[in-house]
Image (spheres, helix red, strand yellow):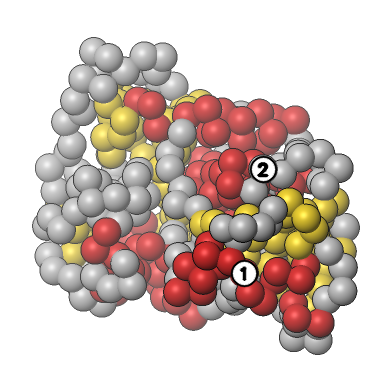
Amino acid sequence: MRAYASDKFGEISDLRLQDVPKPVPTADQILVEVRAAAVNPADLKVLGHKDGGRFLHAASFPLILGYDFSGVVREVGAASAPHAVGDEVYGFLPYARTTRGGTYAEFVAVGAAAAAKKSAAVTHEQAAAAATAATTALQALRDKGRLAAGQRVLVNGGSGGVGGFAVQIAKALGATVSATCSAGKMAHVTESGADQVIDYKATPLGALTETFDLVLDVASTSSYGTCAHLLNPGGAYVTLMPSVGLVFGLMRTLFSSRRCGFVMVKPVAADFAQISTWFDEGKLRPQVDSTFPLADLPRALEHLHSGGVRGKIAITI
């Protein structure tokens, strides 16, 4: 099969479109013919073997990148219920050292418990773009942040892939949503459903006087210490990146009603199914910045690296 892969850790220029063996699914896996994938910052970390990338993928070569996928089931293992050949499914591979394959390929073998049926309301590109991003937002808001209907949430970084879905999912959960972004992206975040959009350069977090039940730091540019004054009693600060500041935050909340934590997203079929339902109901809108064919994967990764992306970058296989 065709796949974009590298024979060493290095730069984007080291990636090559090459022929590699098609994966063989185990009993608890399904073989998916990939119709679309999506670009993530983790790809660059794994390829460069830095910034935690060594913990996100096995050090096996050829190194096939890519986590998100949407496609059609072509083979099913003996214990891979409830999937059947011909099902359109989507999901993502675990961000872990156990992951040896990638989705920038014509086929990928995935755990049956880590995929769910794709919503008919979205394309394969839109579904792949939602897999990691929307699931991260859901797990951060619902599980780690314990967000409930009627509460107030601040999404720090509401214009990117995770941020755009966080705004929409928080609304679907019944919350009032404020979000920060740059001035040029305020209209985009408003269209995502935010009740209030804040230009972070004109009004930094430290200058805000409102309080919230949850601060979700999608941009990972802040800390619990910076945001503590924004939290109501019993409120939570949740970030996507562990840091020294997070450790100090955890220590500060030991004897407080406020909470502090971070999210390491995991592929959960029930969460994919919930996201598909929200797409079916029109409560979620796709967040695709641009789409590239597999042959242009290096250009897509360069686009991600350059910054300024609104939503996600999809790859058509």
Residue situated furthest front in the rendering: 255
Q: Dot 2 surroundings within 10 Å: few (below 14), some, or many (20 or more)?
A: few
Which x, y percent locates residue 93?
A: 35, 43
Q: Does residue 156 appear left or right of residue 263 in this picture?
A: right
Q: Does residue 272 appear left or right of residue 72 in this picture?
A: right
Residue 237 falls in image quadrant: bottom right
Q: Does residue 25 appear left or right of residue 239 in this picture?
A: left
Q: Residue at coordinates 12% horizontally, 42% vertically from top-left?
A: 21
Q: Nearer the viewer, residue 224 or 312?
A: 224
The Cα atoms of the two marked residues, 1 and 2, are separated by 17 Å
Question: Type of residue at label 1?
Answer: Tyr
Q: Residue at coordinates 19% horizontally, 53% vertically from top-left?
A: 58
Q: Nearer the viewer, residue 83 or 218?
A: 218
Q: Residue at coordinates 31% horizontally, 30% vertically from top-left?
A: 111
The residue that label 2 is drawn on is 146
Which x, y percent locates residue 280?
A: 69, 30
Question: Type of residue at label 2?
Answer: Arg
The residue that label 1 is drawn on is 224
Comes first in the chain, label 1 or label 2: 2
Which x, y percent locates residue 216?
A: 65, 60
Q: Residue at coordinates 17% horizontally, 38% vertically from top-left?
A: 22
Which mark is on residue 30? none
